[in-house]
Image (spheres, helix red, strand yellow):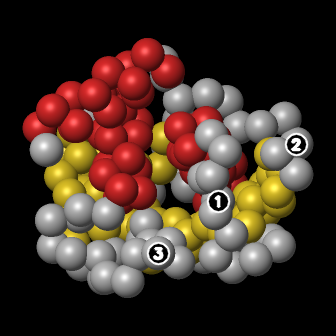
Amino acid sequence: MLKLKNIINEIITEIGTIPKPPSNARFTVGKHSGIVNFSINNLNYIIDIRVIIQQDNKIAISVDFSTAEHEYELTNAKNPFLIIGYIMASVEEWLIHYSKQYCDQNCELIYLKFDPKSENDENLDADMLNKRGRIYKLYITKFSEKYNSTAQFSNVGGIVAKFNPPINIKQ
């Protein structure tokens, strides 16, 4: 298991930083929710973002994504690292838009909740052992390090990444 984790870490390191969102990404930002749409490989992706907490410029969000064509389409089928990178980049860009519109100063992301289930994952176990969850955990860790933060993961109705210190989303 450790060997597999090291291989995945090497692959993510080779990929480099999280890319920019796709050029066709469209952002909808509301006070309590938002959507990001983009198309890759003839699939239309929808990222649903819900603001769970927004108080004193601190926010917590829940992220879910799918394809517009089918709820359980193999969303990462052809290039999982690129798609997951685009999702993380799109969430980051959405947070910047949100910070500009709804925070007096820069927003601070305190936690991010996601549910990395797919049609083939019946249950998400306590150790986050499904493949998608492990890959997301690595990308979120890399995202937090970009902002000089660390992510602590727990399994509470999905996977929750708590950031310490909170991630400062600059306007």
Using a 10 Å C-alpha cutoff, classify the residue at mark 1 as few (fewer than 14 neighbours), some (14 to 19) or many (20 or more). many
User: Would you say 156 lies left or right of 88 here?
Assistant: left
Amino acid carrying label 1: it is Thr
Query: On residue 120, which mark appears?
Result: 3
Please determine whether, in this image, residue 31 is positioned above or below residue 167.
below
Q: Quadrant of the N terminus?
A: top left
Above or below for 101 versus 70: above
Q: Quadrant of the C terminus?
A: top right
Q: Nearer the viewer, mark 2 or mark 1?
A: 1
Looking at the rendered structure, the kind of residue marked 2 is Asn
Q: CA distance from mark 1 to mark 3?
A: 12 Å
Q: Secondary structure at mark 1?
A: loop
| N-terminal label among 2 and 1 | 2
- Residue at the image position 55 percent from the left and 70 percent from the top: 64
Residue, disc 2: 24
Circle 1 is placed at which residue position? 75
Q: Separation of disc 2 and disc 1 at Cα?
A: 17 Å
